[in-house]
Each structure stands twice: as structure tokens, then as C-alpha cells.
Image (cartoon, grey):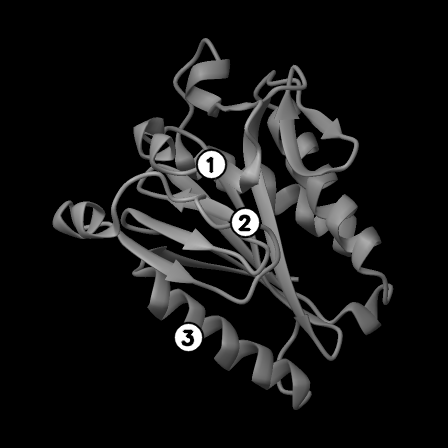
Amino acid sequence: MIVDDWHTIEFMEGWRRQREYVDAILHDQAEDCLAFCEHPAVITLGKRTQKGSVLVDRHELASRGVAVIDVDRGGEATVHNQGQLVGYPMVLLSRHKEDLHWFLRTLEQCIIDALDVFHVKAHRVDGRTGVWVDGHRKICAIGIHCTRWVTYHGFALNVSNDLALFKSVIPCGIHDADVTSIALESSSDISLSAVKESVSHHFQKHFS
């Protein structure tokens, strides 16, 4: 799997790059790729987003420079901002296993293993896609789209980002849970680059 770093990039530009890369995979012109990036503050709404999931008037959000964008991934409302590690695995599942359930669980395991390096004990919660701490604090949201067995979109792992913006939405449509980050769960200062290295290692391990 190729690992690329797009650094800080507007969400719409990242979405455009993904579609372009997926097209290259479909034409047998590209290998599987994991692209890392950060996005300036934005709220994205997946295909399953329920009415009322955005709790703040969109005009007010716009005045704060926060766009609200409907996207074609699964899942519901989530937040991206600086200090959050976003990962876009663009993977031809036919090279591995044509099973979206397997792919989602493998994504979760990659993040769980990567967090363990930093002594953050994370896990799955039955019936709730993503990665959790202590069963009720979500540290990583996951939402994908798949076309002709090629995946895009991916995960948003909270590293050191400001979580206040999450109060503007019902994250992932879940009312009875909080969000957390590596910075809140760890007693040490962990850099985004170190998290990228750990996540990259475990993606290579699971998707080799």
C-alpha cells in the first residue's frame, strides 16, 4: 500500500483527489493508497444523517468559517479540524476480500493497534462503527463509500484537535456518547507525525 501525505487541504479538494485516484485504480493505473491529511474546520454529513443532526444554524457556522457539506460516504454527521488525523484508504477490495464488513472491521483494528502504541486502550462497540475508549467516548469516526469494490473516504482520528466544534452536531447520530482524543487520553504529548507513523505501520501490516 502506498502512503501519501496531503498535509493540510480543504475538504472539497481532498474529495476531488480521492475521486481522481479511485478512477485511476478502476483503470488499473494505481495501487492501493492510504492518504493522510488535515482539514480546516468543516462539518460533513454522510448519507444516513438524520434531520436535526446539526445543532447550530448554518449561517452562524458560515460566519465562523465552518462549512457544512453533504458527502457520499456512509454514516452521519462528523467534524474535521486541525489536529485531527484524517486517513483516506483507497483500496481495491478485489485485491484483498470483497467484503465491506471485513474492510470496516480491519480499519478499526488498524486504529486500535496504532493507539495501543501510545498506551491508549481502544476497542470496538457492537453495532457502532468506529473506535472507542471505555465504551462511551469515540476517538475515531469511520465512514466510507465503495464503488465497484474500490473504497474511498475513511477515518477521522482525534489527536490534538479542539473538540468544541463537535458540540455543533450530534456526532455520528449518537446521543449517549462523548468524543475524545489522544491528547485527552494520554499523559504524554504525542505528535501528529508519530500517530501517522503508527497508523501507517499497522495499515501496511493488515493490508499487505
Quadrant of the image containing the C terminus = bottom right
The residue indicated by pointer 2 is: 76
Q: Residues within 10 Å of mark 2 (few under 14, many from 20)?
A: many
Q: Look at label 3 and name its amino acid.
A: Arg
Q: Is residue 38 visible?
A: no
Q: Is residue 128 left or right of residue 65?
A: right
Q: In the image, what residue type sits under mark 2?
A: Glu
At 59% from the left and 78% from the top, the residue drawn is 22
Residue name at image x 69 percent, y 51 percent = 204
* Three-letter amino acid code at the position of disc 1: Ile
Residue 195 in percent (x, y) is at 50, 35
Q: Measure the alpha-carbon separation of dots 3 and 2.
A: 20 Å
Per the image, the residue denoted by label 3 is: 16
**Residue at the extreme top of the image, as rendered:** 187
Q: Which type of secondary structure does the marked residue at label 3 adopt?
A: helix
Residue 27 x/y as whole percent: 65, 91
Where residue 170 is drawn, which disc sits there?
Answer: 1
Q: Residue at x 70, y 31 (%)?
A: 113
In this view, which residue lies farthest toward the bottom?
Answer: 27
Q: Is residue 64 shown left or right of residue 129?
A: left
Is disc 1 in contact with disc 3, using a CB cutoff of under 8 Å? Answer: no
106, above or below 189, in the image: below
Q: Residues within 10 Å of mark 3 (few under 14, many from 20)?
A: few
Q: Is residue 83 visible?
A: yes
Q: Nearer the viewer, residue 169 or 189?
A: 169
